[in-house]
Amino acid sequence: MGTRQLQSSGMLSRQQLLYLFNRFSFLTSQPDVKKRVADAVNEKKEAVAVTTEIQEEIFLEMGVDPRFGIANLGKVNMTYENDQDLMIQFYKFVATEEVVCDEAELGPDEFTERMDIQQKLQEQQLEMLKHMRKFHLDDQSAILEKLHLQMEDANFENAASVLSTEQIQEIVRKRVSPLFRPL
């Protein structure tokens, strides 16, 4: 078997990146790979070190020098910033890696609990956004500004990323009422 020259220059193509993202998602959903990451954590290794190894193995499958491939991932944002679909896939890839690491580090019970909390939070955020859409664009901007300030004040804690119906109505009421207009 001849030695194949590994790609070590240029930028990974869109097709190469999509292959990496899909392959990584598939592999990390497999029980043996999940166990590999969990075993590493139990041996006091970093989960992200194992997910990086998995990415390096995929790069080798693709004929890409692993160090070059990993370094290229840091350039995806700048190189493909105008390719919305690829950027969405890239962020899904990053999120997948985070979930794999969390699952290994937290264990099955705590991980399930965290995912349930995250699911409820996302449902609340969706309901908030649906409610916001009932208002004029200027009001929506004011609501988002208030939400941004609330999140900053709470150091971007997840719970701060939701406004209640009452809070939204209060923001809109203050904008409409001349009594509350700043001078």
Image: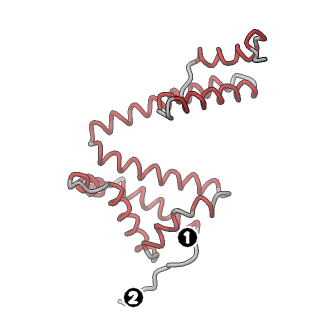
Mark 1: which amino acid?
Leu
Between 78 and 150, the one lying in front of the other is 150
The residue at the far bottom in this view is 2
Image quadrant where one finds the C terminus: top right
Residue bearing mark 1: 12
Residue 14 location in percent, x, y?
A: 58, 66
Q: Is there CB contact under 8 Å for labels 1 and 2?
A: no
Q: Is residue 61 above or below residue 93?
A: below
Residue under label 2, please give it.
Answer: 3
Q: Who's the residue at 37% across and 69% down the image?
A: 57
Q: CA distance from mark 1 to mark 2?
A: 21 Å
Q: Residues within 10 Å of mark 1 (few under 14, many from 20)?
A: some
Q: Is residue 15 left or right of residue 109?
A: right
Frontmost residue, 76 versus 85: 76
Q: Quadrant of residue 44?
A: bottom left
In the picture, the quarter occupied by the N terminus is bottom left
Three-letter residue code for mark 2? Thr
Residue at horizontal 50 percent and vertical 51 percent from the top: 92
Q: Residue furthest front?
A: 183
- Decide if residue 33 is on the left or right side of residue 143: left
Q: Position of residue 51 (x, y in %)?
A: 36, 59
Q: Residue furthest left?
A: 43
Earlier residue among tags 1 and 2: 2
**Where residue 101 appears, x then y in whole percent?**
35, 50
Q: Secondary structure at mark 2?
A: loop
Q: Quadrant of residue 137?
A: top right
Number of other residues with Cα within 10 Å of mark 2, as a class: few under 14, some 14 to 19, many 20 or more: few
The percent coordinates of residue 52 (x first, y second) are 38, 62
Relative to residue 93, is residue 126 drawn left or right? right
